[in-house]
Amino acid sequence: MQRFLQVSSGAQDEPSIVVIKDNNALVIHALDEAAERLGLYIGQPLANARAMYPDLKVFDADVVADAKALSDIADWCDRFTPLVALDPPHGLFLDITGCAHLFGGEAALLQTLVRALARQGFAVGAAIASTSVCARTLTRQTPGVIVVNGGEAAAIDRFPVSALGADEAITTGLRRAGLKTIGDVALRTPSEITARFGARFSTLLAHALGQGDAPISPRKPLPDYIVEKRFAEPIATDTMIAMTLSRLADTLIASMEKQGKGARRLEAAFFRTDGVVRAIMVETGRPVTRSAVIDRLFRERLDALADPLDPGFGFDMVRLSASRTEIVVQEQRDLDANVHDNDELAALIDRIAARIGGKRVVVHLPQDTHIPESAVLAAPAQHHLAAAMQAEWPARAESEPPLRPLRLFDKPEPVTVPFATVPDGPPHQFTWRRAKHAVVRVEGPERIAMEWWRQDGKQLTRDYFRIEDAEGLRFWIFRDGLYEGEVFDADGKPASPGWYVHGLFA
């Protein structure tokens, strides 16, 4: 049986409301308990509320900031369980199944959570039940309640139907039918409720009564392995942080080794005493099976942080998790020198990626296309190292100059050609970057037709030339389009194609 803890933002003593613009009118978007006791309600026009209570405190809604604050609270709640789901706009679901005993039981866990958030300046209500809908309903009516398995129906029997959180039209319809409490609705047969108010409300009611439950959607996928360390006295020094990560790495590796697995993606989360959570992730090209490797990667990552890890008043918990693992394939390593070389190369790539980012360390893979700018694909080295080592590139003819520049421009740069030999000849001179170049040697043309089945016929045929100027500089330029065949002006008459430089030879 699963157990859910529902957390919801509460209220302060002074009556306050939050307003938002709806249909060109300001209406109440949220309110505290003090304002609710005055008879105000969500959706009420601000003008009516102020007419009733002129001294009411009014704040403008900031939906983005509210969502950010709720997400930050959810990050902090990860210390209790990795299964935390958002219940917007003001709530969270925590699946605490199998976690409560770590905190002294469900009552102690609930008390610890509420008090900790209260110290951070939040007013919080929470309840525990076997279904998420029941826990949410309890939080709205009687925060602090813990319902035993099977006691859901009795716990919410006398609550008003509005506590279920159904649509306002359904709540109004229930009241008009004389069904004012959840118990009144529960006395009706499911077929009656479904026929009158729909299957969605019938399912909502069943979940609130403990008759089945829909699974929550955690914000983060559950890692394959998790190890953590809690501290009675917060730690703040780099030495203690490094020692803690090292010990956690030993424990993590030992757990994975029992199942013959290695880590490909690792995350270290640091929980500060003031509620701030900082997470750092590293990836590896091959499954890691040694704690020393994990230690070194996180050292590289921590040293390279643009925003250093700020312990504040200290971290009271550090967690290390492996969110992606793979089965380790045993290889012959004693006699095969290539295996050792590959291991060292993969380790080097991992260290560089940990310092500057995995997307900045790339390998190039050949592609089955004759379009120059698409013939090579830059891919993250950590994930495509094996493919890059096995890739086959076109062999270069001996005693012949290269057919392609070693590196192309990101975008071909236009050049000015005053005249050229038509229809397929090269230019005699051209201007590039405000400098004139006289052509003394030419090789080509090499005609490349664009892939019409991918480009919808929008790309023109190119004629490439290898050109050397009087200064000895060598260019790879092309004419974009064929004379009297592909390039036309606004009147439909043949126009001169454009010329571009695509790369430079060494």
Image (cartoon, rainbow, N blue to C red):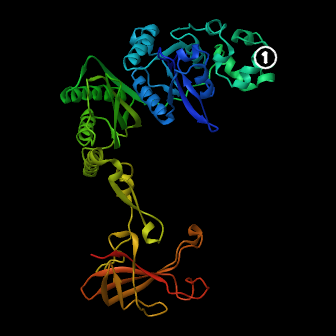
Q: Residue at x 30, y 81 (%)?
A: 474
Position in image of residue 341 (x %, y %): 25, 51
**Is 174 placed above or below 60 here?**
above
Judge by depth and name the residue closer to the eye, 500 or 122. 122
Residue situated furthest bottom in the rendering: 421
Q: Residue at x 42, y 8 (%)?
A: 108
Which residue bears the numbered disc 1?
176
Give the position of the N terminus as an image quadrant. top right
Position in image of residue 144 (x %, y %): 50, 9
Judge by depth and name the residue closer to the eye, 280 or 201. 201
Q: Residue at x 32, y 30 (%)?
A: 253
Q: Residue at x 59, y 82 (%)?
A: 490
Q: Is residue 171 left or right of residue 473?
A: right
Q: Secondary structure at mark 1?
A: helix
Judge by depth and name the residue closer to the eye, 384 or 134. 134
Q: How many marks?
A: 1
Location of residue 211 by image quarter: top right
**Dot 1 alpha-carbon crowd within 10 angstroms: few under 14, some 14 to 19, many 20 or more:** few
